[in-house]
Image (cartoon, helix red, strand yellow):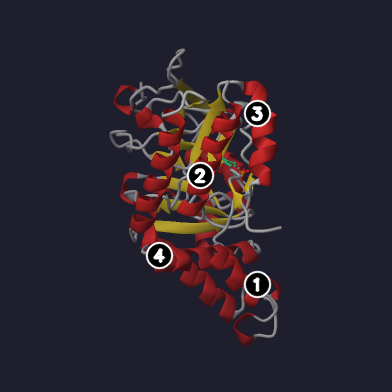
Amino acid sequence: MSKVFNFCAGPAMLPTAVMAKAQQEFVNWQDTGCSVMELSHRSDIYIAMAKKAEADLRELMSIPDNYQVLFCHGGGRGQFSAVPLNLLPQGKSADYIVSGSWSKAAAVEAKNFGDINTININQDNDISLSLLASSDWPLNPDAAYVHYCPNETVNGLEINTIPETHGVPLVADMSSTILSHEVDVSKFALIYAGAQKNIGPSGLTIVIIREDLLGHAQIATPCIMNYKTSADHNSMYNTPPTYAWYLAGLVFQWLKELGGVKAMAKVNKVKAELLYQAIDKSDFYLNHIESQYRSKMNIPFWLKDDSLNDKFLSESEAAGLMALEGHRMVGGMRASIYNAMPLAGVQALVAFMAKFEQENKS
Ligand SMILES: *Cc1c(COP(=O)(O)O)cnc(C)c1O
């Protein structure tokens, strides 16, 4: 099989250079004679690598010193439970902004652990898909925290300004947008992200938490979900996902070599604009999301004639454009174009779409 461009939403494509490096040192890492995945997480050489990965992430995101970075198990959904367990004391409630399927799932899970106030901000109408502006969110000033999802992976909806919560701790599920553009971490109480979209392989979840929020977990919190326990043990209370941590470290180095998050954001903008232009200039393809809420990472689009969906999918795959099928909840197509997707991949997709339109328009 020749080179393909993989548009999967997650697990998603990794930078080729990173995989080549991992392959080259797979059986003999740093002259140990072992694979990194065979080494103790308590060995000096592993700890040095783990610390370097954290330092690189801190540098890439300009994470302030009063934040802890945790390397956890359990994925995004693990955090759907961990966040209320750690941050929602008895007698308080938390606000959950629902803008799409992931933020909804987070709210549903959180209800198992406390009093949750769900705020639906979808403003659906027939022509465009839009959201209630964050300045109009009916937030509870006494909430323990506000949870939202800045990039809805399934729906292709992005909230690209940081909501003002007037001192209420802000929690963000950044699973599909972390490291894609610069964010001011100091505006957040907690940021989490499953690794398999924009960082590395699945199995690793990054949590960035302001230190004053540690140590208030509900009594029933499992120890491996307790942020304080993790922080006190440098994310090694139990065996961390060692290989995924290592690979994430390689991705962080790759990002730094390319100029960091700022440089990445520029390319991501170009990629997204190219694809949205291709969709908007044709009436063969559609995306109804209001432009200010369009995701730069996950771009859904629909063929006006959806009887052509199967043909589009089989021909795009034959052309080396993989995994363009939309999520089963929304149908149509979806192109996930995370950091690892080169501009050439989007150019190839846009060229294919034009050709397919030519050949199939009625
Ligand atoms: C993929 C995803 C999740 C779920 O992640 P898992 O690691 O599968 O639990 C949660 N939130 C968002 C925004 C996602 O994209």
The residue that label 2 is drawn on is 176
Q: Residue 50's x, y, as percent?
A: 53, 70
Q: Residue 340's x, y, as percent?
A: 51, 55
Element at label 2: loop
Whether label 2 lies within 8 Å of ligand 1 gets the answer yes
- For this view, does 147 lie left or right of residue 332? left
Element at label 3: helix
Closer to the eye: label 2 or 3 = 3
Q: Residue 64's x, y, as percent?
A: 33, 58
- For this view, does 292 lie left or right of residue 175? left
**37 shown above or below 299:** below
Closer to the eye: label 2 or 4 = 4
Q: Quadrant of ligand 1?
A: top right
Q: Which mark is residue 309?
A: 3
For the C terminus, the quadrant is top right
Mark 1 residue type? Gln
**283 shown above or below 276:** above
Q: Residue at x 59, y 26 (%)?
A: 330
> Could you say which is closer to the camera, residue 337 or residue 53?
337
- For this view, does 216 lie left or right of residue 1? left
Element at label 4: loop
For the residues labelled 4 and 3, the Cα–Cα distance comes to: 36 Å
Q: Residues within 10 Å of mark 2 (few under 14, many from 20)?
A: many
Mark 3 residue type? Asn
Closer to the eye: label 4 or 3 = 3
The residue that label 1 is drawn on is 23
Residues marked 2 and 3 touching at CB (< 8 Å): no
For the residues labelled 4 and 1, the Cα–Cα distance comes to: 21 Å
Mark 2 residue type? Ser
The residue that label 4 is drawn on is 258
Mark 4 residue type? Leu
Q: Residue at x 36, y 25 (%)?
A: 139
